[in-house]
Image (cartoon, helix red, strand yellow):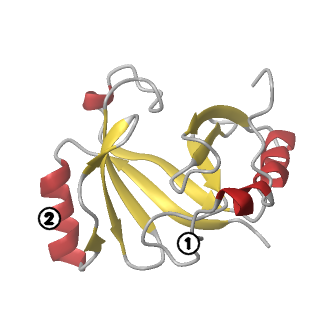
Amino acid sequence: MAARIRHIALAVKDIDATADFYEKALGLTRSEKSEGPTAYRVYMSDGEINLALLQYKSEVGSGLKNPSDFVGIHHFGFQCDDLEDQQKQIEDAGGQFFFDLGDPDDDDFERKFKDPNGIIFDINWKGWTMTSGKVAGQAEAAKSHGTAKKKSGG
């Protein structure tokens, strides 16, 4: 099966005001605000796609020298069936590994790449919070979905 777009991440200056806007203007469902390893975040959804509102803390994970200066679409994500196979397909097509956010067994894990233009995108096999096709996290199930670590030298 082809990878499915299930995640769009926006870098924003004011998470609360932005979440209020999308909730009121478009009726999106909203998660609680939380702090992740690289950013503060609120997830919004229409039930199909996760819209992540992010305030990055630093260059780590964002790739931005001054993350507070950037507002807009930062990256997007695809749910795939097999992490290893999808990574090989991406690298064979010219994509470059960028960053692992979390451990492959984590529910919110993302493996990030850059396309030939330097645009960041990520993949996971479990899906994102509040999306259709979200798989419940189970360490044993992760092992059967090809969750090997990134390619060495990447």
Instruction: Choose between 45 and 147: the one closer to the eye.
Output: 147
Where disc 1 sits, the SS reads: loop
Q: Position of residue 89 (x, y in %)?
A: 84, 49
Give the quadrant of residue 113: top right
Residue 72 in sight from this viewpoint: yes
Q: Residue at x 80, y 38 (%)?
A: 94
Residue bearing mark 2: 20
- Horizontal side, residue 36 vs residue 136: left or right: left
**Nearest to N terminus: mark 1 or mark 2:** 2
Mark 1: amino acid:
Lys
Q: At numbered mark 2, what does the secondary structure look like: helix, strand or loop?
A: helix
Q: Where's the C terminus, which quadrant?
A: top right
Instruction: Measuring from the top left, give residue 43's x and y in whole percent.
Output: 34, 61
At a point 75% along the width and 53% down the height, the residue shown is 83
Where does residue 69 sit, x and y in percent of width and height?
A: 26, 29
* Residue found at x 42% / y 52%: 9
Query: What's under tag 2, amino acid-wise?
Result: Asp
Q: Is residue 154 above or below residue 92?
A: above
Residue 112, picture quadrant: top right
Label 1 to label 2: alpha-carbon separation: 24 Å
Q: Which residue is mark 1?
A: 134
Q: Nearer the viewer, mark 1 or mark 2?
A: 1
* Nearer-the-camera pick, 84 or 23: 84
**Above/below status of 126 relative to 55:** below
